[in-house]
Amino acid sequence: MTLTLLLVAVMALTRAADAAKQTETGQKKDFLTEVNGLVRRAVCPNGWTLYNWRCFLFVQTPMAWSDAEVNCQSMKAHLASVRSAKEYQQIQKMIADQTNQNPLTWLGGSDSAMEGKWLWADGSRFLYTNWCQGEPNNIGNQDCLVMNFSGKNCWDDQQCNNQRPSVCVKNWSLRG
């Protein structure tokens, strides 16, 4: 009996490790994890992409930054924060896979509350940045963060009323 339980546990952990590897590369929309001794499936809603334990959605409809944030909130999400260079590359890949290009796209960064103090709409800490050289520069009161700027596909601050597509982020959910 103990050997059987051990074998089942090893199999579950192996599947979870394989699934975690796949989610790091953006290859899967769900993965297995153990919660309170039960193996559960972490899932993103249809159309969302699982990466690094979060679900991302590219919204192609151009909107002002605040409208894009409200749209994300209507899906129980926020405009996306970015935690690492690898995550940023995965977001870029998700967009390119859907559009065959790298359009200027809203992320969840803004310094509208206090100039020069950048915050993420989802409340996470602003640790990773990918600003283009000389940015953010606040020319013409630019308070919102756009990705895929210039040929380097880095970040720029732009006026929040510009109409852009956007990326939303939310946490995955568990299914038993």
Image (spheres, rainbow, N blue to C red):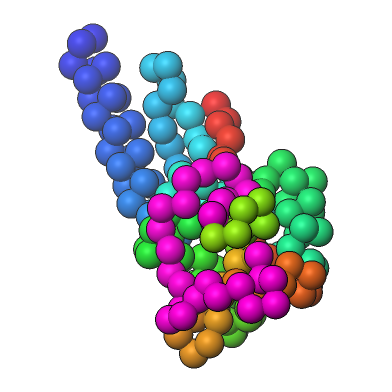
Residue 75 is at least partly visible in this image: no
| Residue 55 drawn above or below residue 162 | above
Image location (x, y in percent) of residue 107: 61, 62
Q: Quadrant of residue 14?
A: top left
The reply, left or right, for residue 71 in relation to residue 93 is right
Is 134 magenta? The answer is yes
On whether residue 57 falls in the magenta region, the answer is no
Which residue does the image show at 79% across and 46% down from the upper left? 74
Image height check: is 150 above or below 86?
A: below
Place residue 7 in its image quadrant.
top left
State the residue in front, 4 or 109. Answer: 109
Comparing 98 with 161, the one in front is 161
Residue at far bottom of view: 151
> In the displayed structure, would residue 67 be above or below residue 18?
below
Percent position (x, y) of residue 40?
A: 48, 29
Q: Is residue 58 left or right of residue 35?
A: right
Q: Residue at x 55, y 31 (%)?
A: 174
Q: Residue at x 43, y 63 (%)?
A: 129
Q: Is residue 54 left or right of residue 32?
A: right
Q: Residue at the spot x=45%, y=85% of the render?
A: 152
